[in-house]
Amino acid sequence: MLSSESQVVLRNQEYFQSGNVIVVNPNDAEVFNELGSNVSGFHQFYDIYEQAYAADFTRHEFNTHLAQPDNLYDSAIVYMPKVKAHLSMILANLASVVRPQGQIFIVGHNKSGIKSCVKHLEQVCDTVNKVDSAKHCGLFVGSVKANAKTFVLDDFITTKTYQLNSVTWQVVGLPSVFSQDALDPGTELLISSLPSELKGNILDFACGAGVIAGYIGAKHAQRTEQGETQSWLHLVLSDINALSLYCAQRTLHLNNLQGDVIASNGLTNVEGKFSHIITNPPFHTGVNTDYSIAYGFLAQAAEHLLEQGQLTLVANSFLNYADNLEEHVGPCHKLTNTNKFAVYSATKARKKHS
């Protein structure tokens, strides 16, 4: 079933029946089944992109931002993001790729704070109006100002320096990317609980800005005169968010580290087996709490672990991941906990040979 936001878009599709229309970060792929061939999709989240691409690969792009097209868009539809700074960045991008006096629509659930989009639209639009209110959602529109500033993604980058356990490393952030502004307490507890020696292939699942991989790489790189990681350590970072993947790549580069950065919905696109999988798994989809991502990951994780490989994760302390880890990976124990977070580690058992 289509989301409420997409139903509101389709209620008003007379606005999108002509011209060159771009839909930004829709929360379901099925909406394109009801929209014309003049409507294409731009995605910063790989799960919806993957679904939409499978249905019609010619209409969809997965990237950090929209590059300047040969022909400017006539209008755009933005699904309200969770982070307001992310919306500002998207609108700055759209203002440079939608023609002057072209229209930017924003749709969102009331719980997303959709009413606050007006002040953001006013930054790039001359006039802003409410188009519709239905299904606990709102739809707003603005007319793009002339002479928009050229969009440069790196204008929105932040760089933070973190220090923990005598390890210093830098992390690149962008709006909506986890751990952009500070070292998350859960992640700090997780990396403080890791073994002092890590070898082999290491997967940082749901890597965000690359905080975990950056710490691991920086810690082991300190042992070389060249400031690079030892050959026995290979970092792989995966995430669903294009902005996270960009930041993770920049974080590796900033710390003189090498690694593979992979767009993947869960572990679908991750290949090979790992001695360690380390994660602070997400539990939100949009503005809604959703543990299915973490549970789906756990169900697949054992296939990507070597025998005696370890999966270490941090979670809210009220969530008991131990049973799931025992079921899907192997013997599990709690490494540490606070009143807010707990760190679990499970080891994949050796196969029994007859």
Image: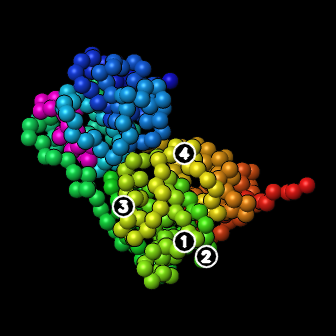
Q: Which residues are magenta?
A: 88-105
Circle 1 residue: 231
Q: Where 78 sits versus 220, above or below?
A: above
Residue 342 seen in this snapshot: no
**Distance between the Cα atoms at labels 1 and 3?**
21 Å
Q: Is residue 93 magenta?
A: yes
Circle 3 residue: 250
- Apparent side of residue 271 relative to residue 184 in the rendered image (left or right): right
Circle 4 residue: 269
Secondary structure of the residue carrying tag 2 is: loop
Please tell me in which quadrant of the rendered image residue 332 appears. bottom right
Identity of the residue drawn at 27% across and 17% down: 17
The disc, 4 or 3, on the residue closer to the chain's N-terminal end is: 3
- Give how far across and how far down residue 114 sits, in percent: 31, 37
Residue type at mark 4 is Asn
Out of 85 and 64, give the one closest to the viewer: 64
- Give how far across and how far down residue 34 sits, in percent: 39, 18
Residue at the far left: name it: 147
Secondary structure of the residue carrying tag 1 is: loop
Q: Which mark is residue 331?
A: none
Circle 2 residue: 197
Identity of the residue drawn at 30% across and 62% down: 158
The disc, 2 or 3, on the residue closer to the chain's N-terminal end is: 2
**1 vs 3, front mark:** 1
The disc, 1 or 3, on the residue closer to the chain's N-terminal end is: 1
- Give how far across and how far down residue 244 sits, in percent: 40, 53
- Mark 4: few/some/many CA within 10 Å (<14, 14-19, 20+): few
Out of 316 and 153, give the one closest to the viewer: 153
**Cβ–Cβ under 8 Å for marks 2 and 3:** no
Please tell me in which quadrant of the rendered image residue 76 appears. top left
